[in-house]
Image: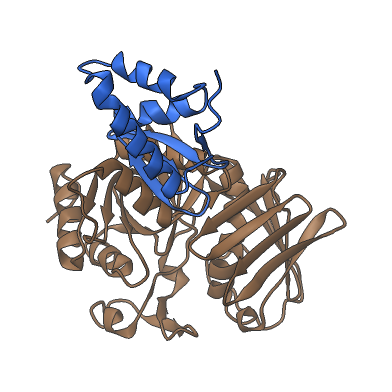
Amino acid sequence: MWDSDLPRPVDGVVEQDVDEGLLLLKENGEYLVLNHTGATVWRALSNAQNVDEIEVELTRMKNAPSRTEIEPLVEKFLVKLRESGFTKA
Amino acid sequence: MIVRKFGDIRVGFTIETGVPNINFPAGFPIASENQTDPDIHFNVGVGVLKVVPPDTETSLQRGNTRAYGDKTRLVWTHPQMGTFIEVHPRAGTGSIFLPQWAWNRATDIMDQIILPALLPPFAARGMRGIHASAVEMNGMGIMFAGETGSGKTSCALQLVAEGGKLIADDMVFLSRDGDSHIIYGMGDGPRAFQDVWTRFPQWQANQLEPSGKRRLSPDHVPWSQSATLKRIILLDDSIDMTDNRQAKLIMKLLSLTYFDNIAASTLQMLSELLQRVPVQMEADIDTAASIARTVYKSTGSLSN
């Protein structure tokens, strides 16, 4: 089911793979560096139907924490993305 | 028309007769020669510089300066200076109206008109302009990148005094050639304040710019100098590199680069550059020059 609250990347964000994970650059020059887990969440935002899908994907990662540990981390990360203007509702 | 090569890009210049109050320096391609058709063509006319704008829509920016346009128009703007270059379509070519201060300053024309005008068509062909100076020795290039006043010219002149060849002082063109990155200059003389020139009495700085800077005669600087880039020395040590080093280096270099509106291509180019060319950060000018000497000595390129 589509979760209308799932944020989506704003238009014009440019991505570049870097050693540390993923570099995101907005048109106004602001940038954000995501680690590999953050990069996984970011990329899932374009395709996932809801947050559950993203969290399930994260649990499949190597050495992933439990789902209950992942949920608050994802929530906090999504808030950070929205507050920094890289996503929109 | 004379054609100068910058990598694989041929730039043609045609100087029309009757240009008043412009004394072109030695080395400036004012002579008439029949050569092959260039990729980019400049007509320098009476008070007007005509440019064939890029074929495709282009937008470049660095700091507050922005250029945009396509084959029908090309505009350079700055918040304080306003529109300082504007190309209008006219019979298949565009015309750049030279600001009055540039009429009798050929090197300013190079710096302020021709170099910026080259950036969009060069970018469309994969080249980028970066705020840096560069020196070559035995085909090995070192680039000093940094903000205005960071010491790019001072570093370059130290190495030139020891036998290096100056490639560029303020604007380095950069392109990729297979696994290598090639740097080019446009043959313009370095600019520096008087205190820098007093350290290098062997050269005569004979042009005073509106900013109060002096400039080495273009006679000292070869045209179309190029080299394979082997090291980047970033004249800045204020960036905390404890984490996200590559991303921070990319963003710093991006801030010094004229990039197109598809910043992804520039980010990718800088990422590839950092994978192949080591970067060192050093704000002290003499130490930065010493690093460059060490690089040259490690290859046996510096005689003493």
Residue at the (32%, 84%) spot, across then down: B194
Identify the residue at image location x=61%, y=43%.
B124
- Tell whether A88 sits left or right of B89: left
Q: Please give the letter of the chain rendered in blue.
A: A
> Residue A81: horizontal and vertical position, in percent?
41, 42
**Residue B128 is at least partly visible in this image:** yes
Question: As drawn, is B276 to the left or to the right of B130?
Answer: left
Look at 49% across and 22% down and name the residue there.
A48
In this picture, residue B39 sits left or right of residue A82: right
Can you tell which quarter of the image residue A43 is in?
Answer: top left
Quarter of the figure with residue B126:
top right
Chain B, chosen colour in render: brown
- Name the quarter where the C terminus of chain B is drawn: bottom left
* Residue B226 seen in the figure: no
Residue B48 lies, with reference to residue B104, above or below; the image says above
**Residue lying furthest top in this view?**
A60
* Quadrant where the N terminus of chain B is found in the figure: bottom right
Which residue is rendered at x = 71% and y = 50% of the image? B34
In front of the other: B101 or B205? B101
Residue B182 screen position, x and y as percent: 41, 42
- For the image, the number of numbered tags is 0
